[in-house]
Image (tube, rainbow, N blue to C red):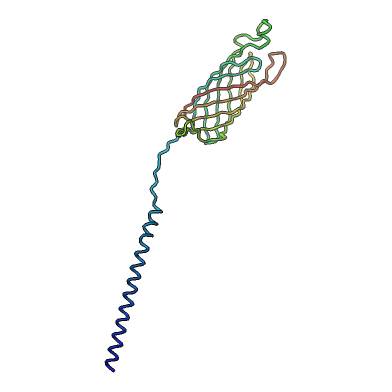
């Protein structure tokens, strides 16, 4: 009886040792398989990205803008002549701005004066043109303009309309202006403008009262402050 009990205990101990060794070897084998997967996973979720610095000019924090401009003003029946002036704008937000403009030009001769060779319709002083207006502008398409593949500038297309007065031919004439322009920000405080505007007022010099459309094309340089 005692020998049978010893044999039973010996077999039980051998079986337990075998089971422990078996499961230990399985665990070690499983860890060896998962280790490469973990390393590969860490490499996949930690890529090395080379970043480049991009610097874009933008409007400075100041909201006021002063512009000097020059170009051509075509007065109906009096030809196209040089115009110079200045504009002062306040940018209410990134979309809307108000602007005051003062411009000066001088009208030429009408076709009648050139062909007839008769008495001039206006004196030299009456041909002087001085206008001012207050306008409201809206930036339609703010974005970027690329001069080269690696060089870009902030820019915007805008529309503008306003009301003012034009002194011409010895009278002050109520004037409505409408138009649009393109603004290119060369730096954070310096901008370049190209504008096309129509100054609309009544004129009665050629024996009839009519509404004249007077187109203006200008190039300007502005500073923000």
From the top left corner, tell me how far across and down residue 191 is, in percent: 48, 28
Asked if residue 207 can be seen in this view, the reply is yes
Q: Which sits in the foreground, 83 or 98? A: 83
Q: Residue at x 68, y 10 (%)?
A: 112
Residue at the outermost bottom position: 1
Residue 75 occupies which quadrant of the picture? top right
Residue 225 in sight here: no
Res. 106 image quadrant:
top right
Instruction: From this view, report whether residue 58 is shown above or below residue 43.
Output: above
User: Left or right of 24: which side holds 172?
Assistant: right
* Quadrant occupied by the C terminus: top left
- The number of discs equals 0
Front residue of 80 and 7: 7
Give coordinates of residue 40: x percent, y percent: 38, 56
For the N terminus, the quadrant is bottom left
Side of 47 where 87 appears, left or right: right
Q: Position of residue 50 (x, y in %)?
A: 39, 44
Q: Is residue 23 above or below residue 121?
A: below
Residue projecting furthest to the top: 118
Residue 84, position in %: x, y?
Answer: 54, 18
Side of 68 relative to 50 (left or right): right
Q: Height in image: 125 above or below 181?
A: above
Q: Quadrant of residue 198?
A: top right
Note whether 134 is above or below 143 in the view shown.
Answer: above
The structure residue drawn at horizontal position 39% and vertical position 52%, both measured from the top left corner, is 46
In the picture as drawn, the residue positioned furthest to the right comes out as 208
């Amino acid at each position: 009886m005692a020998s049978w009990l010893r044999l039973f205990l010996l077999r039980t101990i051998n079986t337990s040792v075998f089971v422990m060794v078996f499961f230990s070897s399985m665990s070690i084998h499983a860890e060896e398989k998962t280790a490469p997967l973990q390393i590969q996973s860490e490499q996949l979720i930690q890529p090395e990205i080379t970043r480049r610095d991009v610097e874009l000019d933008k409007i400075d924090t100041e909201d006021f803008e002063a512009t000097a401009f020059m170009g051509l003003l075509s007065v109906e029946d009096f030809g196209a002549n040089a115009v110079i002036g200045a504009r002062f704008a306040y940018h209410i937000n990134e979309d809307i701005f108000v602007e005051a403009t003062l411009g000066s030009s001088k009208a030429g001769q009408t076709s009648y004066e050139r062909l007839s060779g008769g008495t001039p319709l206006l004196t030299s002083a009456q041909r002087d043109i001085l206008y001012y207006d207050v306008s409201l502008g809206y930036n339609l398409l703010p974005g970027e303009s690329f001069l080269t593949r690696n060089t870009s500038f902030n820019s915007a297309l805008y529309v503008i309309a306003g009301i003012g007065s034009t002194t011409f031919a010895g009278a002050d004439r109520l004037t409505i202006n409408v138009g649009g322009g393109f603004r290119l920000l060369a730096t954070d405080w310096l901008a370049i403008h190209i504008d096309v505007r129509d100054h609309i007022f009544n004129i009665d010099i050629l024996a009839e009262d009519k509404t004249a459309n007077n187109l203006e094309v200008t190039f300007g340089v502005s500073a923000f402050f």
